[in-house]
Amino acid sequence: MNNTFKRKEIKYLLTSDQRKSFEKAIIQYIQKDQYSNYTICNIYFDTPDARLIRRSIEKPVYKEKMRIRSYGPADDNTKVFIELKKKFQGIVYKRRIAMPMAEALAYISGKSSRSGQVEEEINYFMKMYEGICPAMYIAYDRKAYFVTEDPELRITFDDNILWRDEDVSLSSDVYGYPILISGQSLMEIKCAGAMPLWLVRALADNRIYESSFSKYGVAYERKLALKLAN
């Protein structure tokens, strides 16, 4: 399994009609991912003063974040991924390591140590952002495809995106506040190079345009709005 990535991750917000038409237009060029339909659960880490997400919302040239990801609710023995994502001038660099959840939580909390190139980057990140801790739970249902002629080119659709800032645990059930409106989907095109012409045409024909969208960013803004409302 690849533990390092360098690619563009382009996001689009689609209506249900746009999605149906777009999927129909590209179906001959794509195949379902090995695990086509699955639920992704994430814990995003941040400092007590939300330094990481506040900076990300400002849309700087460089930004970074760290999360733990599982596929569905996890127990102590479930394999999870600790992921470090950095974005510079539109290119996403992702590093990740996999381990059982109990071991991952011990490592993040400083109760155990690990060595390796990716681990060194994560260690440096946690040292730089002193006091970093679980800040937000975000989960969603994902449908994933890859392009037949270029398996590194992936297209994903995320639905039922939920967030919560209490019970921030991968072992709990999937629940929370919705991010998208009814019938809306978040599509991502993940590519290392240029998009093929058929994909560009399908986007244009369906009037699908790139959207600046961060799940954690939107969740954080919704959290602030709820606090103001109360």
Image (cartoon, rainbow, N blue to C red):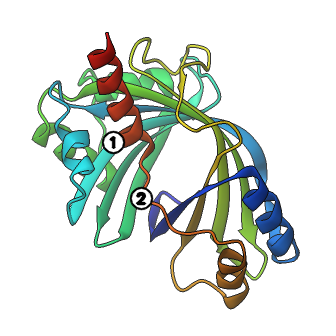
Tell me the quarter of the picture where residue 114 sits. Answer: top left
Q: Which is nearer the eye, 80 or 40?
A: 40
Check the image and report above or below for 155 versus 51: below
Tell me the quarter of the picture where residue 166 sits. Answer: top left
Q: Where is residue 118 in the image (x, y as percent from the top left)?
A: 33, 53
Q: Where is residue 60 in the image (x, y as percent from the top left)?
A: 20, 60
Q: Which is nearer the eye, 149 or 204?
A: 204
Real-space CA distance between mark 2 and mark 1, rounded to the nearest whole angstrom:
19 Å
Location of mark 2 (residue) = 212
Q: Which residue is drawn at 23% across and 25% down?
A: 110
Q: Residues within 10 Å of mark 1 (few under 14, many from 20)?
A: many
Check the image and report above or below for 85 versus 153: above
Amino acid type at mark 1: Met
Location of mark 1 (residue) = 66
Check the image and report above or below for 83 versus 113: below
Q: Residue at x 68, y 90 (%)?
A: 197
Q: Where is residue 135 in the image (x, y as percent from the top left)?
A: 32, 25
Q: Residue at x 47, y 61 (%)?
A: 211
* Residue 111, disc: none
- The residue furthest bottom is 197
